[in-house]
Amino acid sequence: MIKVIIAGFKGRMGSAAVKMVQEDESLELVALVDPKTSETAVDGIPVFNDKLSLVGFDADVWADFTIPAVAFENTKFALENHFCPVVGTTGFTESQISELISLSQVNKVGGLIAPNFAIGAILLMEFAQKAAQYFPDVEIIELHHDNKQDAPSGTAIKTAELIKEKRSFKKQGAADEVETMAGARGAEFDGMRIHSVRLPGLVAHQEVIFGAKGEGLTIRHDSYDRVSFMGGVNVGIKKVVEIDTLVYGLDHLL
Amino acid sequence: MIKVIIAGFKGRMGSAAVKMVQEDESLELVALVDPKTSETAVDGIPVFNDKLSLVGFDADVWADFTIPAVAFENTKFALENHFCPVVGTTGFTESQISELISLSQVNKVGGLIAPNFAIGAILLMEFAQKAAQYFPDVEIIELHHDNKQDAPSGTAIKTAELIKEKRSFKKQGAADEVETMAGARGAEFDGMRIHSVRLPGLVAHQEVIFGAKGEGLTIRHDSYDRVSFMGGVNVGIKKVVEIDTLVYGLDHLL
Amino acid sequence: MIKVIIAGFKGRMGSAAVKMVQEDESLELVALVDPKTSETAVDGIPVFNDKLSLVGFDADVWADFTIPAVAFENTKFALENHFCPVVGTTGFTESQISELISLSQVNKVGGLIAPNFAIGAILLMEFAQKAAQYFPDVEIIELHHDNKQDAPSGTAIKTAELIKEKRSFKKQGAADEVETMAGARGAEFDGMRIHSVRLPGLVAHQEVIFGAKGEGLTIRHDSYDRVSFMGGVNVGIKKVVEIDTLVYGLDHLL
Amino acid sequence: MIKVIIAGFKGRMGSAAVKMVQEDESLELVALVDPKTSETAVDGIPVFNDKLSLVGFDADVWADFTIPAVAFENTKFALENHFCPVVGTTGFTESQISELISLSQVNKVGGLIAPNFAIGAILLMEFAQKAAQYFPDVEIIELHHDNKQDAPSGTAIKTAELIKEKRSFKKQGAADEVETMAGARGAEFDGMRIHSVRLPGLVAHQEVIFGAKGEGLTIRHDSYDRVSFMGGVNVGIKKVVEIDTLVYGLDHLL
């Protein structure tokens, strides 16, 4: 049984994490942290206002879904007290991340800071990067609801950047290609093409399509609901107790 | 049994049509026409150099896969001799088509001139046009091999034009939509978006995606091989004998 | 402006319908009906406990999302008072439907009883039925969440029945086909095959795949949310005022 | 420049390999081997009837597309003469493979015996196996032309076996699941389901669909033409010169 403390348990991610930990028989929720609440226990789980009360507490993992202003100090505290941090808060600076990694190595405590807990999206990016080594011809189609302001999506750009790292550069399409209607061939990124579809009813979807002589390989991720992030938090909790350094990015643990 | 004459039987479409007619038990190949060949029979089917030799011949349908220069005269000849023409040659002028339609009505002979015999593509366009009446939010993704020069494809533009006829105009996407990379949202046509994917391995594919609150409807056509046109020729042959006017476009017979 | 009365406005469908009518500028919500509520008005719209109070009321359409026990009498009342009924309640007997159709014709009042308001699903079935006339080779894949008890889904069976009506019978697959693992080829229905996928994360999806020499045609419907039914209710309200008989099934109005 | 000998250059795979090597600027075709041909050169490349004539020949790779009866001796010969073997012939016994691996290690010569050179199919299997570690809910849909006799396909079964190695066992679907039509839920393999679609027009396609709360991940491979195998042969040739043991399966080099 991995004993888990959850800080920031009243927010959207935090409360989903409470539910996830309680439903997993290999995890035990041992403490909740929130500086402002007046409750002393929830479902029999003790609630603490001050993290200092947890010095010496019997726990393995410190899952943190607080705000950027406190997450850095929380993570330091966790590392110093040998609770493996699993941090979903974003907004750390590079120097903060470096400092936390050093601290984790000094204390030999595993940890994870993850800007993205969607395992499916991370696997898609990893697979796409690998396939690009063998299939340099690739196009990305990302599909979102029609209230999304920016195109392409951040995930599509990130995917293209990861592909670029491994793909032999190639300007795709016919040499004499002509757009009879501007934009038909999508956005160009390093010779690849990215297409953004916006329609009501859609949530967040992405397809990476590779083509080669006589074959095609397509990887698609469909994201319907934020609840999907909890799979990644679950993996993070189970993996950090097995390592002895803090890593940035869930991809390092998959 | 429908008795079929095939003119232009040595070309790519014509020879495929010979094979198709011979394999269909409800069709009988009764004559072949080619002005230049020296053969007098192929597989026991008589071959004629001059169409005038076929005046009074016992046949129902005149399938024509000749060149534009002779197809018009051939079609007139067929109508005047009560052979229902099924014509795959393109390049007729509007006035030629009008003249042939009038002639067919005077003679009460059914007929078909079809610029496109791909039933799947025609059904896709018909279905897309109908769905657009209920789902004004629609994007088209067409995918072709990477030697294709023009984008979007002719079929995609034709599909968009047909949709436009029935769809209530709508400028799609978010009102404050921003392309952070030019072309990401594809080509705009009447407020719709068209995206052109080009990859080796692909042949000719098209998806029309409709989105509405809480649902989506997608229609996709995959074309792998020219042999698919024969299904349309087959339908044409069987339908023209049941009508008493010439029509332009296989969609009128589906 | 079409003036709409909504009966059963407190239920899930009814309250969604209230919102839909209020958001459509070509519709005007003029009255609400519920036998048990104590409110006399909601958002300025009068609420009635007894339908008899609406005799002579100025309205065009009676949208009914009540329970089977009252929907029949409500529909009769609507037809007799020249409110075009749009009824989403299911459970009418065939003789009740016949009686209502006769009554509508006597009164020359349009109306709609619809067991299914999902336009996308209805269009998919219509398109599949049409395509099956030209492509006798077809398989259905339906995909649902993994709590669904029955397989195949009712919609898949209904789709197969509609296809059967128009398709030339064909036993699909190779003549010497062998299942090395039982069930691999799915359920057989009139020579067609139906496959049921069950996975967490999925909602309700259906693909109908047609194949022919050298081409394929796929029609897919994705249903994410009950809100999608409101598009069908909207179409129903706008169409019933243009007809002078009651019809059973939204497909008759598409 | 990697210097390549091709044995069995007159067969379907061998002749495609000749073309592929000639078109790749980083490869040089230096010799062809066929015991029965009377030609002494093809396109200026020397042809040998007896492999013994190649002892001491200046080459790096021995690509072998011969028949099982000679491939084993050929591979031994290549390893002994420090030509890295890339062997597409199937039918080796386990003890033959062990013997060849030992011989390669003694001689410190890299090599590859590959029952499957389709990179896309191999990547699909690798990705599916990895994803299954995080997403235990998975179904496989394989789609082939309707002349295929067996269902499921060998690739689908192989994929399921690979997934099984890494996936926590789970009996999928609802606990109270009922097939109202036998076979609807497909074939069961270790709690997973496999569905086989057979339609004219299709070639060889496979989808592996993972589902989890709020998300889905789909990996699809489309195989249209045997030419796709050449990408794998190309990778094999380039990788074997960098290793010092023979491996079985292209997946070990991707």
Image (spheres, coloured by chain):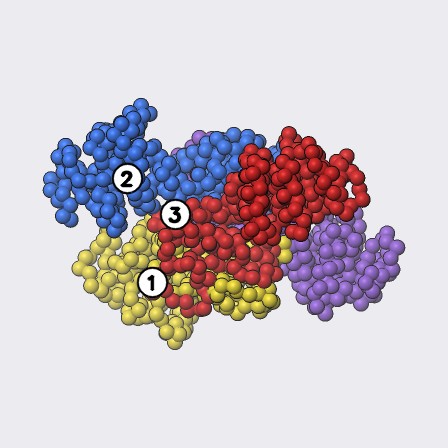
Chain colours: A red, B yellow, C purple, D blue
Chain to which mark 1 belongs: A
- Asked if residue A205 shows in the view, the reply is yes
Give the residue pinned by disc 2: D241
For the point 55% across and 65% down, the residue is: B178
**Quarter-wise, where is residue B12 in the image?**
bottom left
Kind of residue sitting beneath label 1: Ala
**Is B165 above or below relative to A81?**
below
Q: Horizontal and vertical percent for residue D28?
A: 21, 46
> Viewer-proximal residue, C22 or D135?
D135
- Asked if residue B24 shows in the view, the reply is no
> Viewer-proximal residue, C127 or D24?
D24
Farthest residue to the top: give it: D95
For the point 71% across and 64% down, the residue is: C23
Q: Horizontal and vertical percent for residue D13?
A: 27, 41
Which of discs 1 and 3 lies nearer the camera? The answer is 3
Kind of residue sitting beneath label 3: Gln
Tally of numbered tags: 3
Badge number at residue A175: 1
A218 relative position to A38: left or right:
left
